[in-house]
Amino acid sequence: MSFRARHLLGIEHLAPDEIRTILDLADQYVDLNRRTVKRTDALAGMTQINMFFENSTRTQSSFELAGKRLGADVMNMTMAQSSVKKGETLIDTALTLNAMHPDLLVVRHGASGAVNLLASKVNCAVLNAGDGRHEHPTQALLDALTIRRAKGRIQRLTVAICGDIAHSRVARSNLILLGKMENRVRLIGPPTLMPAGVAEFGCEVYDDMAAGLKDADVVMMLRLQKERMDGGFIPSEREYFHRFGLDAEKLAHAKPDAIVMHPGPMNRGVEIDGTIADDINRSVIQEQVEMGVAVRMACMDLLARNLRAERGRAATGVMV
Amino acid sequence: MTIYLENARLIDPEAGTETLGNIILDAGLIAVVGALSAPKGARIIDCGGKCLAPGIVDIGVKVGEPGERHKESFRSAGLAAAAGGVTTMIVRPDTDPALDTPEMLEFVTRRAAGASPVRIRHMAALTKGRAGREMTEIGFLLDAGAVAFTDCDHVVTDTKVLSRALTYARSLGALVIGHPQDPGLSVGAAVTTGKFASLRGLPGVSPMAERMCLDRDLALVEMTGVRWHADQITCARSLPPLERAKANGLDVTAGVSIHHLTLNDLDVGDYRTFFKVKPPLRDEQDRLAVVEAVASGLIDIISSMHTPQDEESKRLPFEDAASGAVALQTLLPAAMRLYHAGHIGLPQLFRAMALNPAKRLGLPQGRLAEGAPADLVLFDPDAPFVLDRFTLMSKSKNTPFDGQRMEGRVLATFVGGQQVFGPDQGEAA
C-alpha cells in the first residue's frame, strides 16, 4: 500500500500513487455503500471528532456518515457557537480536544493554514475539511473519483473549472490534483475572481466561456458566494449568469459527452442553469455526493491504518 | 576613561575604506584614528584584526512603552541593541496610546533615560492618535526632542490633511517619514500577491500598492518641499519614481528593512507567522532589485524595523497573526549575508546602517572620524552560529531567523566611549 501520510491536510503533499491508492479503496467503499448493510469495523473503537469552525451541513454529514459506516464513535462539534466565542485560541481548543484522545480529527476553518497549525499540536490524524481559500482535499478526491468512474480514467483529460476561482479552496485542490494526474486544466472566470499568478501553476486561464469550454471533457462549476455578487467583484448576478453561467448554449462548446460537476450547494440561475444541473446524461452532481462518502471512508481508513502502525511501532520500540 | 583599540579592521563608511589600524577613544569621543601607540593609562583592547565600525543607528525601532511593555521595554530593547551593535535606537511612535503630545514625549524620554545602555531618540506621530485627521504639535514636539514625524503603518488617506501637515512640517524643517503602502489595496493583505499567495490561499496585496502610494507622497513632497523619508521601499517598481524624485532635487531618502533584503515571500513556507511582516515579504526579483538599490545608494538606509510580538499574537492562523519581527540583535548578522554574497561591501553597509541614518536625522553619530561620538561596534563578520531565538535579549522572540545558520557576531559595543556589550577585560576578540 502506498499511502504514507500522517494527516490529510491538502493534495499538495500527496504523490500520484497515494491518490490512486485512495481512489482504489474508495471504489470498494462505493460498492459497500450500495448494499443494505453498510458497515465495516475498520475504525471500530476509534474516536472521530468533527470540528467545524465554519457552518457546513453537507460536508459535515458526509464525514459523519463515513465515520459511522466504518464503525467509529463520531462526535460533532459546531465550533461557531462554542468556546471560540469565549475567546479560546485555536491552539487551546486543539489541546483540549487532544486531551480527550481522539484518533481522527476532521477540521474545517475559515482561515487558510489553520488546519496545518492545528495538526502540528495534536497526536491524532487530522483531516482537512476545508481551510479558508487554501485546500479542500476530500472534495478534490471525490471529484477525481467521480471523473474516473464516468470517463474511465483520470489522465489526459481536459477539465474546465469555472467561476469564482480566487475564493475557492475546491478549485485549488482540484487544480493541484488534476495537474499531478497529468490532465489539462483550464480556469474560466472573470478576472476579478481569478487569483494572481495562477497561470504559473501550469493551467490555461480564460475569461470567455466559449473559448475555455472548447472540447472540454469535464466542466466543473463553482459556487458563487452571495456576498460577492453585488458590485464588489462582479457587476450583478444577471450579468454573471449571462457571461459565466453554464447553460445549454455554452455547454455546446464542450465535447458532446462532457460531464458537468458542481461541489454544491448550487445557485440555480447564477452559475448553472437548472435544466443542465438536472440533465441525467450530463450532470454527475448527485454522484459527487455519493462518491464523497466513499472517498472520506477511504481517507479515514488509510489514515487510521497509518496511525495504528505508528502507535504499534512506538509501543514495540521499533526504530523507523 | 581612555580606551586604545589596537589591531582593528577599521570600517570607515564616509571614506568607503577598510584599513588595519588603531584608534583612541577619550571623553566619549573618537580622539585619534590611526594612532601609533597607546596613550598612558589607557585600557588596551586587542581587536585581533576584527572589524570596528560606527555603531548602527536604527530608524524605526518599536518599543512597547507605553502600552505593551510585556512585549518590549526600553531596558530589554536597549540590551538587545547593545548585543546587536545598535548604538542609537530611533524609536517609533506607534505605541498605545500613540506618542503624539510633547507631554508624552517627555514622559517616555524620562522612562528611557538610564534604562537602556544605548542611546534612544524618539519619533513622534504626524497626526493626533495616528488617526490621519489633525496634525500633532510639531513645533512643541521638535522642542521636546522628536527627531522625525511619522504615523508609521497608518497611512494618512486624506491628502488635504497630509498636505497641510507636510507644509507645516516644512516650515519647521522637520523630517517626515512615510510608509508608502496604498491602504485601499492593502486591506486584509497577509502576503504579496503571486503564485505562492494563491497556492497558500492567503489574501495578497500587489507590490503596485507601494508604488501608488509612493507616487502620491512624492507629488505632495514636490508640492510642499518637505524633508521626507520613505520607511521601507521593498520592490522594483518603486525604484524608478524614487530615482526621478532624487534627480529632480527633492529632499527625499528611502529605507528598507533587513528582512526585505534577506528573505522572500517563499520563506513563509508552511504558514510560518514569524515571517509575517509589513509590508509583506516580496518575491526574489524584487528582493534582488532592492539589494541592488542599496548597493547603488538609491536606497539610503537599512533598518531593523524591530517589531516585538508576544507568542500569543503569533500562534494564530497566518491571516489572524500579528505582523512584525524582532531584529535589533539579528540586523548585523543578517546584513553580513549581503556582504558574504558579494552584494555590498562593509563600508557601504555601514553607510546604510550608521552614517546615512545619522546624517538624515542630523545626529553626529555614524562616523569613524576624530571628534565623532565614540559609538562603535567591534564584530567578526565571519563567525558562524546557529540562531536560537530564546537566546535573544528582547522580551519577544519573534525572529524569522530562528534555527538559521548565520555569520557575523558582535564582539563588543561602545556607546559614548563606554563599553556596553562584550567581555570586560583585555582582548575582546
Image: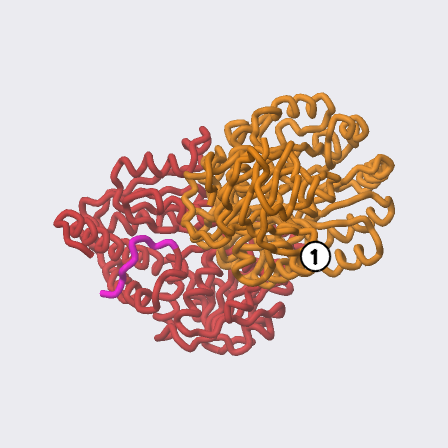
Q: Is residue B331 left or right of residue A22?
A: right
Q: Please say if B195 is above or below B11.
A: below
- Please give the name of the residue rendered at 33% of the width and 49% of the height, measured from the top-left corner: A126
Chain identifier matching the red colour in the rendered picture: A
| Front-most of residues B150 and B11 | B11
Q: Give coordinates of residue B156: x percent, y percent.
A: 74, 40
Residue occupying image coordinates x 62% and y 53%: B349
Q: Is residue B157 left or right of residue A276?
A: right
Image mark 1: chain: B
Please check the rendered image and state whether residue B318 is part of the magenta-colored stretch, yes or no. Answer: no
The image position of residue B100, as x and y in percent, is: 71, 28
**Type of colouring:** by chain
Color of chain B here? orange
Please provide the residue range marked out in magenta. Answer: A1-9
Which residue is drawn at the image coordinates 53% and 34% (left, top)? B420
Query: Position of A185 compared to B124: left or right?
Result: left
> Which residue is located at x 44 percent, y 76 percent?
A157
What amino acid type should be assigned to the residue bearing mark 1? Gly
Residue A73, position as x, y percentages in the image: 24, 42
Q: Is residue A1 above or below residue A94?
A: below
Image coordinates of residue A318 in percent, x first then y, are: 15, 53
Q: Secondary structure at mark 1?
A: loop
Magenta span: helix, strand or loop, mainly? loop
Q: Quadrant of the N terminus of chain B?
A: top right
Q: Nearer the viewer, residue B398 or B343?
A: B343
Q: Which residue is mark 1?
A: B297
